[in-house]
Amino acid sequence: MTPTILVVDDDHAFRDLVVEILASEGYRVLEAEDAERALEILSDREIDLVLTDQRMPGISGVELARRVRTSANPPEVIVMTAYGTIAQAVEAMQSGVADYLTKPLESPASLRRLVRRVLGERIEAQPSSGEFLSRDPRVLEILSVIDRAAATDATILITGESGTGKELLARRVHNTSPRSGGAFVAVNCAALPQSLAESELFGHEKGAFTGADRRRSGRFEQANGGTLFLDEIGELSEEIQAKLLRAIEERTVERVGGGAPVDLDIRLVAATNRDLESLVRDGLFRSDLYFRLNVIAVELPPLRARPADIAMLAPILAATNAERLGLPAKELSENAMAALERSSWPGNVRELRNVLERALIVATGSEITSRDLPTLEPASPAGSAAQGAATAVPLALEERERQAILDALKQCDGHRERAARLLGVSVRTLYNRLKQYGVH
């Protein structure tokens, strides 16, 4: 699929230059003159990469990056500026941007190389757009439950490890529901800065705080008539949990700095990779909110527990990776497939896709063999036995999560940013987990 790039810059001439360079490479290119227009486009379209100027009237490029990164499946962001300083670069990188580019451009070729690299690092949770692929009987039963629930307005809670496809399942709910003609608004709660969470979710009035130069609708209002997907809902603060509960119960929100309630007509889907019941017991998650969310609850099993899906997904991922990278398609040898099926996959489908991308690049023959694969963490004998034994006692979710983090750090040679991408979580969430589990 051709990547879609959004270029945001109030300098018309420079914006035209960037658009021309990228369009000549075959990308689908959209443009916006400021961050406000960019946010409108991002609310309506699937965008793979945003290139934004830093200094613009109103919302800056770094602030735009922060807002962009709060969606559940955010595009990559490159910040461009004619005022390149180390301080700005650090601020941009802390906002989750993929890279930082100074103006004027060194050359059109340098821009092309940077864009190709950033888009090449983008990892999707599933190989197809909008379709959740599985042969596993448990997952097929989950899909059946989801499809029946989609016809109603019941709240749905999806649990499972990072990378199992929770957002894709939420999109399936939306696409098969009577609300499919409305908006699907996804929010990554783990990426919401504490100081901006209320404004992002519920909106704000003009003058509500410094920098609020106009009224802004929050994610709840943006989802009116459609579906609101709150990913990593276990990361919300107690204060925001209380406001979320009120919004769900009363079907209204109040913008920050406003007094009049705004009526809501939304379907809510929430997801988490954490054990909410355990968080409730520990006093970290409101029990009343948990019961409001836990109407239709489904748990996606990890990839290592469904080997039939590994055998199905691996050839598809290899083929889509080859097409995206412009490489010849290569079959998977029997020994390569056996190695994939024996692995533990702490990063689930995201990790599988990443491994196959690397194998395509390093393979020199006409097929991918086990020699082309990186060292993979084998599934433990106890874990393998548990797949078919109802009497097996599963590890606590916290212990599985801790082990997945350790596995990802090992695979990424201790590089925490790459490990976060592999696990499908924000860097901030990873650092919080490392502190929680005493990992140094």
Image (spheres, rainbow, N blue to C red):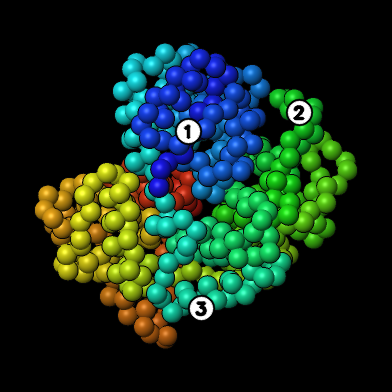
Q: Nearer the viewer, mark 1 or mark 3?
A: 1
Label 1 to label 3, Cα distance in Å? 40 Å
> Which residue is at the front of the view, 293 or 55?
55
Residue 329 tag number: none
Task: Please indicate, yes or no, whether residue 37 appears anywhere in the rendered image.
Answer: yes
Q: In the drawing, does residue 321 fall left or right of residue 198? A: left
What residue appears at the point 47 percent right and 76 percent down from the top-left corner? Answer: 140
Which numbered disc flags the more N-terminal residue, 2 or 1?
Answer: 1
Q: Position of residue 156 (x, y in %)?
A: 63, 66
Q: Where residue 276 sits in the image (x, y, percent)?
A: 59, 64
Instruction: Tell me which numbered mark, 2 or 3, is placed earlier along the sequence.
Output: 3
Give me the residue at 84% from left, 38% from top.
258
Q: Is residue 190 visible?
A: no
Q: Residues within 10 Å of mark 1 (few under 14, many from 20)?
A: many
Q: Is residue 238 left or right of residue 8?
A: right
For residue 262, side relative to residue 92 (left or right): right
Question: Where does the image place residue 399, in percent across and percent down from the top left?
Answer: 43, 64
Q: In the depicted view, which residue is nearer to us: 277 or 25?
A: 25
Report the side of 101 relative to 168 (left or right).
left
Query: Image point 23% across, 46% down: which residue?
Result: 327
The crowd level at tag 3 (other Cα within 10 Å; few <14, some 14-19, many 20+) is: few
The residue indicated by pointer 1 is 29
Q: Residue at x 42, y 13 (%)?
A: 104
Q: Which residue is mark 2?
A: 214
Q: Quadrant of residue 376?
A: bottom left
Q: CA distance from mark 2 to mark 3?
A: 47 Å
Q: Amino acid at mark 3?
A: Glu
Q: Which residue bears the numbered disc 3?
A: 141
